[in-house]
Amino acid sequence: MKFMHLADLHIGKTILEQSLIEDQEYMLNQILKIIEEEKVEIVLIAGDIYDRIVPSSESVELLDSFLNNLIKGLKVKVFIISGNHDSKERLNFGSKIFENDGLYIQTTYDGKIRKVQLEDEFGKLNIYMMPFVKPVDVKQYFKKEIKSYDDAFKYIMENENINQKERNIILAHQFITNCGIEPEQCESETLIIGGTENIDVSYFDKFDYVALRTYTWTSKNWKR
Amino acid sequence: MKFMHLADLHIGKTILEQSLIEDQEYMLNQILKIIEEEKVEIVLIAGDIYDRIVPSSESVELLDSFLNNLIKGLKVKVFIISGNHDSKERLNFGSKIFENDGLYIQTTYDGKIRKVQLEDEFGKLNIYMMPFVKPVDVKQYFKKEIKSYDDAFKYIMENENINQKERNIILAHQFITNCGIEPEQCESETLIIGGTENIDVSYFDKFDYVALRTYTWTSKNWKR
């Protein structure tokens, strides 16, 4: 099954009071074209769909049009998690109804990571949907002290039973850093990106593909 | 086919800075109970779903839950038009996808009134969905001078071909006044409710049922 991984659409973003909505519409139309040409069957969108907690009406309209084209036009399945810029409640609207049409939206963690199972000629494909969470959102589920994002994900992942005989994909919108098994070695990086939001990449070892938010590393700071 | 007519839910309304959301949740749950007990098959919601153009996240969540219960739980068909308090774009989100599940949302007039045709043992049942419009929203469709709401509806209705051998229902969210064929006779009423927004009831003569917004007449003013 061919999939495309998107993230950080940030629909409705403005730069220096200039709206990017026309550029974003152009970009999304290009994405639709690629999906059609490449015969993509699954689209993963790993958070920050909107740029604001309360998106503008034109942002809502643009996402609506994009999703309609994906679901009704191109008949692909779409998996969306909320990012730190999204409102859980707003992005979640209609999500239970949408699932009949192959549009899955997950905006909460409820003690287990939401798993959707698909199947193709190669067997089972599990899609885990982990929306952006803060430690405070998950501590009710674990009788353990959770001081950091890293603690939170340690317990979240310990609580999952990933069947490695099947293919597993996870969508997540956290800051994942690649510091091997000894995160204390990479103090410089953790200082730069704000430290406490880091989650060690090793927690995701059991997944075949991890669909994260997009950021690029530069020498001084993280940029989207 | 048994239907229920609702309007002016105004989800998220506050009175003297007091949120009514808990009362509204209670009310919507009572409505769900009645729909179940009475075996209602169609729910018409004639505008003003939300109280504000930008509804709060808890309002979005409450409507989401209500619609899920209607569509997924009670398996009724739901027809919604936008009112003057609703944002066309926000209320319209997902509407094309929802239709697979029997949830119809109409927020624009595009030159013809949207008609959805149902059928039961008594024959065809046409549901016309006319969202709230101002004269400026419709004048592009008619090569005539449109000075008032009444003008607008005159031309909108002349442009429709209602088959009176079938049953016809219309949802609308305008101020309809019952002044017979000579609206100039009822000057006192038109003055009281703002005059120019009035639409004469005679334009709706061909419909078997007109599902309007809710208002009650008092001697001095209109109240919802």
Image (cartoon, coloured by chain):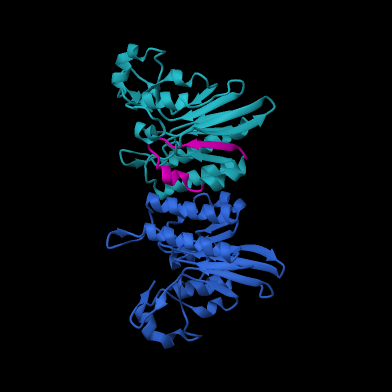
Chain colours: A cyan, B blue
A118 in the magenta segment: no
The answer to whether residue B153 is visible is yes
Residue at the spot 35% in from the left edge and 83% down from the top edge: B219
**Residue at x 29%, y 20% (from the top left corner):** A192
- Which quadrant does the C terminus of chain A fall into? top left
Instruction: Indicate whether A61 appears above or below A125.
Output: below
Count up the numbered dots.
0
Q: Give the residue furthest to the front.
A: A143
The answer to whether residue B114 shows anywhere in this view is no
Q: What range is drawn magenta here?
A: A75-94
Please tell me whether residue A72 is drawn above or below residue A185 in the rendered image: below
- The residue closer to the viewer here, A88 or A215, is A88
Front-most of residues B223 and A18: B223
Task: Give the residue at x 55% y 30%.
Answer: A127
| Quarter of the rendering containing residue A149 | top left
The foreground one among A113 and A94 is: A113
Q: Is residue A88 magenta?
A: yes
Percent position (x, y) of residue A39?
63, 32
Picture quarter with the N terminus of chain A: top right
Q: Position of residue A219 (x, y in %)?
A: 32, 17
x and y percent of residue A177 in the render? Answer: 39, 19
**Residue at screen point 48% across, 21% down:** A204
Vertical order, A182 against B45 (above or below): above
Question: Up-down: is A117 above or below A154?
Answer: below
Residue placed furthest toward the bottom: B185
Q: Quadrant of residue B161?
A: bottom right
Residue A51 in the figure: left or right of residue B162: left
In percent of width and height, residue A35 lies at 58, 33
Quarter residue A199 falls in: top left
